[in-house]
Amino acid sequence: MKEKKKKKPDQVVFDEKSQKYEASIKPYATNVGAPAIQMEDVTSWKNTSVKKVNHHFKTNFEKIKAQYDAMMEAFEYNDLIYRAKFSFEPVIGQVYHLYRAKDDTTFLSMIAPSECSFKFIDSFALDMDRVWQRVDNVDA
């Protein structure tokens, strides 16, 4: 006759393979009297983190948008200058003035705004990359 093994009660943590009691090495409670496992409420942490992340992305977006807006403004006045009439080769670093004539055409000139009767638009200097840069504090 086959000997019947006694089954341990459900609350006893016993491994049949190793024939050892394992309650002390489990990472969780193993009996009814042990404290209940409570899930942490991470809602407030998530909400705070979401606000911080959103602020981070919004700030970065605003920086990139400001750079884009500045680049588009530079592109627009460079386009305006390169479409303007001028009959000389501009010198790098020299300040030139953009004007609008009575027939609504634009032209680039070396003549200062104080010495000219045309509608002054702005002053620019050509840089090494052949990009026109706006120049401030020019005799207007």
Image (cartoon, rainbow, N blue to C red):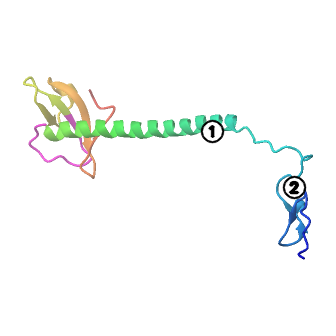
Local secondary structure at mark 2: loop
Quarter of the view holding residue 69 = top left
Front residue of 52 and 12? 12
Residue 82 magenta: no
Farthest residue to the bottom: give it: 1
Q: Earlier in the sequence, mark 1 or mark 2?
A: 2
Above or below, comparing residue 137 to residue 37 in the picture: above
Above or below, comparing residue 91 to residue 56 in the picture: below
Please report the residue visible at 19 percent of the width from the left and 33 percent of the height from the top: 98
Which residues, given as a range, are shown in magenta? 84-97
Local secondary structure at mark 1: helix
Mark 1: few/some/many CA within 10 Å (<14, 14-19, 20+): few
Cα separation between marks 1 and 2: 43 Å
- Residue 35 % position (x, y): 88, 44
Q: Amino acid at mark 1?
A: Ser
Give the residue number, with chain letter if any, for mark 1.
49
Please report the residue visible at 33 percent of the width from the left and 31 percent of the height from the top: 137
In the picture, measured across the screen, residue 10 lies left or right of residue 81, that is right
| Magenta: main secondary structure | loop
- Residue 17 % position (x, y): 83, 72
Please report the residue visible at 45 percent of the width from the left and 36 percent of the height from the top: 62
Quarter of the view holding residue 41 = top right
Front residue of 119 and 2? 2
Q: Which mark is residue 132?
A: none
- Residue 32 % position (x, y): 89, 47
- Residue 20 % position (x, y): 90, 69
Q: Amino acid at mark 2?
A: Asp
Front residue of 91 and 4? 4
Residue 85 magenta: yes
Give the residue number, with chain letter if any, for mark 2.
10
